[in-house]
């Protein structure tokens, strides 16, 4: 059992929890995720790690209510426990293995949309801890939906807050902030964008135009988290990849977002899942090379 040490509501239907998980905390890196399960019959829920404390042996997760399982999860309090808390899973962010001196010479922009601020935060914190200042854009629909602003402000070199309705910070979507920075003469060597699929799509369309290499996290399409279910199958350039075992981070300019979003909609129904399995054959979930498919 994995004890919940802290549970709080950050915004409407968005929750944060600190969980006692020493082994995960000891080995995890920015960009990776965990899978939680509330009980023996509970649904497996993949969640990107928001923060970790190796000394305390804790992992911080942030999630949004999107269905029955996350609704039940939101009702858990400090002192309750998860039946399973598996991780770290997925590949760490590429910059973790880069030469630090080379990394310090790069101009890096992080773009977080909505709950995407949670997986962006540990990456920006890692940068700060390694003496690297980065710019961060955080966007939300309204001021009330904004999360982790103070935490992000403490680790970002420059923080730009946007709200779609103009209720706080820059008025407009994150893409309009990117355009504004470009007009001001800001130049970046790489952009890391994490958030809703549609946000990442339009960020990538813009950064491609601006010739800024862009990494995206495809964690929004993960379901099972092991490569077995086929939910997170996506086209990256000429290759078939799976977000949970090959990612969750990929070259955003190579990701076919339209196909991924269409699959995401189809996967929600039993008929849609059957159709995807028929259409995709052996590559439906066995094509990742890690899970073994139906074997």
Image (cartoon, rainbow, N blue to C red):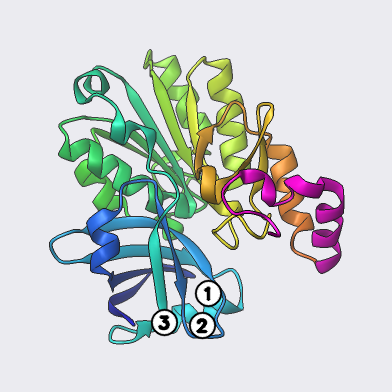
Q: Give the vertical position of 289 relative to 182 (above or below).
A: below
Q: Which residue is mark 3?
A: 83
Mark nearer the N terminus (2 vs 3): 2
Main secondary structure of the magenta stretch: helix
Answer whether residue 164 is visible to the viewer in this image. no
Callout 2 environment at 10 Å: few (<14), some (14 to 19), or many (20+)?
few
Q: CA distance from mark 1 to mark 3?
A: 15 Å
Q: Is 294 colored magenta in this rendering?
A: yes
Instruction: Residue 33 in the image: state x and y as whole percent.
Output: 42, 56
Left or right of 113, for residue 268 = right
The magenta-colored residue range is 270-295
Q: Which residue is mark 1?
A: 70
Residue under circle 2? 72
Compared with 50, 197 (above or below) is above
Tell me where residue 22 sits by quadrant: bottom left
Residue 241: image location, x then y, percent = 62, 40
Tag 1 secondary structure? helix
Would residue 94 appear left or right of 288 to someone viewing this image?
Answer: left
Q: In the image, which disc is placed on residue 217?
A: none
Task: Write the residue at 54% across / 51% down.
Answer: 244
Q: Are marks 2 and 1 in contact (CB under 8 Å)?
A: yes
């Amino acid at each position: 059992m994995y004890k919940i040490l802290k549970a709080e509501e950050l915004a409407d239907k968005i929750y944060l929890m600190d969980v006692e998980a020493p082994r995960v905390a000891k080995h995890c890196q920015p960009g990776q995720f965990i899978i939680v399960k509330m009980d023996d019959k509970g649904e497996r829920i993949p969640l990107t790690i928001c923060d970790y404390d190796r000394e305390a042996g804790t992992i911080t997760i942030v999630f949004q209510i999107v269905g029955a399982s996350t609704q039940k999860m939101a009702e858990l309090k400090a002192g309750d426990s998860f039946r399973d808390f598996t991780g770290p899973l997925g590949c760490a962010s590429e910059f973790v293995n880069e030469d630090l001196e080379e990394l310090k010479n790069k101009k890096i922009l992080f773009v977080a949309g909505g709950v995407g601020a949670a997986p962006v935060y540990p990456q920006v914190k890692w940068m700060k801890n390694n003496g690297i200042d980065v710019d961060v854009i955080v966007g939300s629909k309204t001021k009330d939906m904004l999360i982790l602003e103070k935490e992000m402000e403490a680790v970002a070199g420059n923080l730009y807050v946007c709200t779609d309705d103009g209720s706080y910070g820059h008025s407009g979507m994150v893409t309009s902030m990117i355009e504004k920075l470009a007009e001001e003469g800001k130049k970046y060597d790489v952009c890391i964008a994490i958030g809703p699929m549609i946000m990442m799509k339009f960020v990538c369309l813009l950064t491609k135009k601006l010739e800024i290499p862009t990494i995206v996290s495809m964690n929004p399409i993960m379901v099972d988290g092991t490569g077995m279910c086929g939910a997170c199958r996506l086209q990256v350039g000429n290759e078939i990849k799976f977000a949970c075992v090959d990612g969750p981070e990929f070259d955003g300019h190579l990701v076919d977002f339209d196909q991924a979003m269409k699959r995401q909609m189809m996967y929600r129904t039993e008929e849609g899942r059957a159709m995807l399995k028929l259409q995709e054959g052996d590559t439906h979930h066995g094509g990742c090379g890690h899970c073994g498919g139906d074997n």
